[in-house]
Image (cartoon, rainbow, N blue to C red):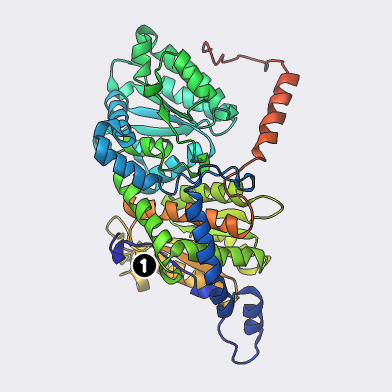
Amino acid sequence: MQLPDESIEYSYQRLIAPPPNEWSPLAELQSQHLLSADRIEAIRSVMNTVRGQVAAERELTNPPAKLQPLMPGFIDLPQKLLDQFRRKGDDSTLGRVSQLSTRMRDNCDRVVVLGVGGSSLGAKALFQALGHTYHNELPDKLRMGKPRLYFEGDNLDNDSLAELLELLENTCEVPDDRAERWGIIVCNRSGESLETAAAYRAVRAELARYYAAKSDQHFLKELVIGITGASTKLRDLMLAEGYSDDEILTTPDDVNSRYAVFTPAGLLPAAIVGLDVRALLLGAAAMTKRFLEEPFDRNPVLQFAAVNHLMTEELGKRTRVMTVWGRKLEAIGHWYDHIVGESLGKLGKGPTPMTVVASRDLYSRGQLLQEGNRDKIVNNLYVRTVKHNPIMIGMADRNEDDLNSISRKGFPDLMEAAFHGTNKALEQAARPSADISLPVLSEHTLGQLLQMMMLATVVEGRLANVNPYGQSAADPFQRHTFAELRATPNLPKGEVRDAAKGV
């Protein structure tokens, strides 16, 4: 297990009402909107029981109907991938991810990642949190040969896709020059996502047009990597395009797409931009070990699931705010929104997730959090150490901005002051908030964090008596969308870009 100073922690002390000494308006609000210490104590045994249930579900080969669908494969996946790599090397999943990422880096300066939901949100969270904020704008030398990443196929926005194709058309003109070559990763676990399937047809057609002089199947296969389930429409399509089964990366059958960040869906884009995917998996495996072995007081998975469940179901805090302290963490918040919404939003239950980027969004959401409806719990995501040297305020000859008094402070000091000041203000108004703290932002700590959130979501689902794996409500969206399309066959007016032939 990781050393203590490498561990992420969950601190929920501000969610516990202090013992009442005498009546006051604040004490009354605390009694209504915070948890009692007795309630935390009472749920400990329940959490041990639920942990045992979740752990036991990993071993079920023929689960009863009431548990289906049951897809707990993500729990042990990080350690399994590491063990498989030690045994099989290049023939393992990690070995293949490494080989394909190297091939894509060698062949391309730009990679378009197509996917929706869990097929892309995890990869985007890793890229944004651990990569350079302006990675795509850096020249190749400063990127050290790591390709630019562009994410599409997660919506039906015509203009967004058209502008990506326009970018590729105008920046890539010499196919023989690696600096002007681009490729595709298409990830569609179920093979049923319309957004990704339609985008793949359009982008694949643009790829074939650009490389028309070299468009033999072997050449194009070097530039397109598919990630999907064992038996899907995308796999059938790629097989028809000349790929073999071994050339298509497979997501495990027992891992739902929203829990797929440690499958090739998340690992391949991460590896392409040079992230240490083994460190990610080591962090995730360490968190699983903590979940299975540690008592409640040292178990962030059980703590996070317990207090958020109590806040939602018993105190009516049905808006769950993930306040991420830093722009680089924003995609993690959106990834968690997806996990919570699809896993817990069932049977009339479940919190409504919301991501807030601090300190930026305090100017739009701070009033709401401080004095709005008391239906919210705030979970802060905070990194204690910055990556770069602090930028200092510094002294200036002109002091109309009144900053000379804090001239010896740096931006990390400003962020820390805003963090503590904001939470102090919430505390004094009996507005519940808690903290997930990371010692540093690294592959190892991020692996811990993502695994913690996935495990806690499954535990919370079992606490609330909803299946955290199923997502039957997604079917009506797809069914009605296709019905609308088939009922309105007319083409749009004006010049049309044919997804199969170009303009």
Left or right of 198 in this view: 324: left
Q: How many marks?
A: 1
Measured as percent of width and height from the top left, residue 42 is found at: 57, 75
Whether residue 276 is visible, yes or no, is no
Point 34% across, 21% down: residue? 181
Task: Tell me the quarter of the picture where residue 484 sits.
Answer: top right
Viewer-proximal residue among 375 and 234: 234
Q: Is residue 7 above or below residue 250?
A: below
Residue marked by disc 1:
413
Q: Is residue 48 above or below residue 444?
A: below
Q: Is residue 142 above or below residue 221?
A: below
Measured as percent of width and height from the top left, residue 151 is found at: 46, 34
Mark 1 crowdedness (10 Å alpha carbons): few <14, some 14-19, many ≥20: some
Q: Is residue 241 above or below residue 364?
A: above
Label 1 sits on a secondary structure element that is helix
Measured as percent of width and height from the top left, residue 416 is found at: 40, 67
Residue furthest to the right in view is 487
Measured as percent of width and height from the top left, residue 412 is found at: 35, 63
Viewer-proximal residue among 102 and 348: 348
Label 1 is placed on what type of residue? Asp
Point 55% across, 25% down: residue? 197
Whether residue 179 is visible, yes or no, is yes
Viewer-proximal residue among 375 and 98: 98
